[in-house]
Image (cartoon, rainbow, N blue to C red):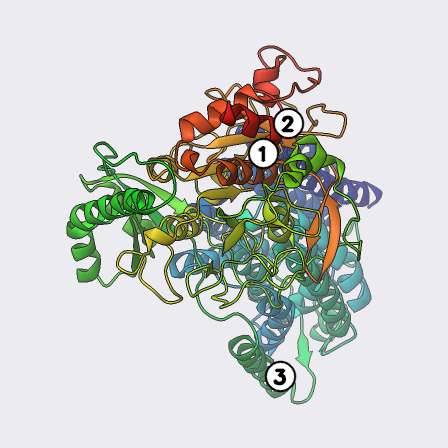
Amino acid sequence: MVAAVLVGVWAVAVAVVSQFGVVLTGQVLGQLGLDLPGLVWPLIGLLALALVGIPAWLLARMPRHPGVRAVGTAFGLGALVLGAGSALRLIPASANELYLLAYAVLAGAAAYVLYRRTDGAGAFGPTVPGALGWAVLGGVLVLAPFLWSGALGGLTESLAALLAAAAAGALAMTILAPLWRHFTGRGRPTLVLAGGLVAGAALALVAGGTGASGVQILLLLVLPPLGFAVAALAPASPRGWTTLTLVALAAFGPVGFVDPDEMNLALIGRDVPFYALLAALIAWLVALVVGAAYGVGLLRTEHPSSAAHRAGAPVGWTGPGVPVQPQQPLHVVPRTGGRTLAAGLATAVALGAGAYYLSTGQPGFFGDQLFVVLKEQAPLTGLPTTTGLGPGRDERVNAVYRRLVEHADRTQAPLRTELDRWGLDYQPYYLVNAILVNGGPETRIWLEARSDVDRVLTDQRLRPLPAEVPVEHGDEQQAPTVPQWNLRMVGAPDLWLRGVTGKGIVVGSSDSGVDGTHPALAANFRGGDDSWLDPWSDSRTPNDHNGHGTHTTATAVGRERVGVAPDAQWIGCVNLERNMSSPSLYLDCMQFMLAPYAHGGNPFTDGRPARAPHVLNNSWGCPPLEGCDSTVLRPATSALAAAGIAFVAAAGNTGPACGSLDTPPATDPASITIAAVDENRTVTGFSSRGPAGGKPDLSAPGAAVLSAMPGGTYARLSGTSMATPHVSGVIALLWSAHPELVGDLARTQQLLRESTQPALIANAPAPCDDEAAQAGAGIVNAAEAVVAAAG
């Protein structure tokens, strides 16, 4: 028995440490811009199988006690689930539908084989009436927190999750069913406590092997405490159907209502990881309460030895070391009205949970969509190259807009016709010749087989939350009394003294939003019905969903001595409400910046290219996790450049690794990519490094930068997100002083490069050990650039 306890504790420790360790390592690497090697999961699975399987095998073979050997067998089977389930995570979390279907097939097949091999081994009699009702009641109670906190994926993904949860329940049933005859001889307390602990350890192994990366962490909280409820109901369902029901309903919460992609450190604050972990903790407590309630006797069992004595039969196994009668009947007597009570409570709780979900939860399907990139992208040759402000600039932007729209309408027509015929929802795009399609794996297979389709990407769709993410406010209430070090470093105050403040230039901000009521930003919002777009929440007036966009926009054009170009106007678009987005949402804002339109307008027909901003600030990146590949946004940034619009992009915060600058749009040739330096002019440790096709281009202040935050507050933030708007503001100052340069991107970049100040280079290995790979041409200086333009 001591050996069984030690092996159980060891098994749980291996399951928890291995799964938490790899998930956490992958998350940290992801924040550094690195990928967890795919072979790590199979290797971890093999290691976990060996670490648990070998002691379990010895426990199943060496002791004389049949009960202890049965425990060892259960742990050994659980180790197989842990090892095989870990290896299955070779399928990436972004392909959750495929993972769930593969798990359902493999786990279901394994459960079937085990059931056939052990059929009748744990059977002492028929299932007691009402037992399944108690199982449904407990399962729904454990599932309920996820009905509050989470949301389903797509229809196919949700059906796959249901099958996977049922398969996990079937595995638990077949692993645990042979155990219970070894725990009934000493009465109900031993059954519930000792049997519950053994079942909990086995369920921890099953949990560690179930769910895509990140989801198994939730299952490790949800499933093990169900061991006590499983043990309490075991005599009432000798073949284990109550186990299957309990575990399947509980497992469906994490696998069905949580997207593994969203269990990500990038979603800080009260986002999916917060609510998912909170729901799992609540479910953990509920599972313990349910186990305790069932254990104290919602069903009353009659001791098998008493029944045997009355029947004149030999007494069965009553403890370790004593033989057992394999098929000795176990008499279970439900309390008066138990069947009716169980069915009534289960029905009431299930209906109540369903009503709550439909009325207060997030009902519906919220699966990832398909971003279909067509082969034939619009040609950008033969378009006007007019520079300067005035009608010529308007004609140039309009020509690009018309070329893109006409090309998209023509080349997308056959695919749109087919999508209409099949009744599939879709949204066309023109800045990249692409269509967003709401479809599952079967639709993807059909689309990828078409001759006009280049590739199909997963368009990440964040699932809704039970409450809005709180908006971040700054810790300083007063604006600075003098320009801070960052503004002085880029030479902005020197130009203000000469009357160069950005007047006549419009800067577009695509970010988390903008607090349009902030004193630093309210006065220079361009206004009109085409200066704000919110594809996330459909808001009508500028607002910020978390604070990041207010900070970056104010650094570019804010007043109150925080912005580089305080008299430039701004317009805004929300492309990153919750710190994870998708190609389609990024494109919504990029299209709006090329040709703004009124609320509710059609980007293809209602765009107003003459109202396009001159400079775009983009303090974001689209990594593979969000659905982007290395070139998907390149047609968009090239088209904006063809229109003479300066597209300024953050290099990213995954430094100091060499080659960490690897995410679009920072890698796009048409982008002006910005690295970050600190107050000492040294490239920051977080700033992403090249080489990446000559990126970064320039650098600017990005460490502890003071700027505006929602609610009239101010804060110091760090990141290449903070460096980027400095360059957007510098271009606004340069073009305000020399309007003839508007749209002349080559000359503008030449002036910026020739007037830079040198940056101090941090230690880095070759080929990232020079200024070009870390800081581009150097630190921008608006005053020097304006002087150079005049000369």
The image position of residue 134, as x and y in percent, is 63, 75
Picture layout, residue 754 above or below residue 686 = above
Q: Quadrant of residue 418?
A: bottom left
- Specify which label sits upstream in the sequence, 1 or 3: 3
Q: Amino acid at mark 1?
A: Gly
Instruction: Work out whether 115 lies above or below 39.
Output: below
Residues 653 and 390: in front is: 390
Q: Are marks 2 and 3 in contact (CB under 8 Å)?
A: no
Q: CA distance from mark 2 to mark 1?
A: 8 Å
In this rendering, would 273 be left or right of 1? left
- Residue at mark 2: 655
CA–CA distance between discs 1 and 3? 54 Å
Q: Return the residue at label 1.
A: 652
Q: Is the residue under label 1 in contact with that under label 2 (CB below 8 Å)?
A: yes
Q: Are marks 1 and 3 in contact (CB under 8 Å)?
A: no
Q: Give the amino acid type for the residue marked by disc 2 in the picture.
A: Gly
Identify residue type, mark 3: Leu
Element at label 3:
helix
Q: Nearer the viewer, mark 1 or mark 3?
A: 1
Closer to the N terminus: mark 2 or mark 3?
3
Q: Which residue is mark 3?
A: 345
Label 2 packing within 10 angstroms: few (<14), some (14-19), many (20+): many
Q: Is residue 465 left or right of residue 450?
A: right
Q: Neighbour class for label 1 at 10 Å: few (<14), some, many (≥20)?
A: many
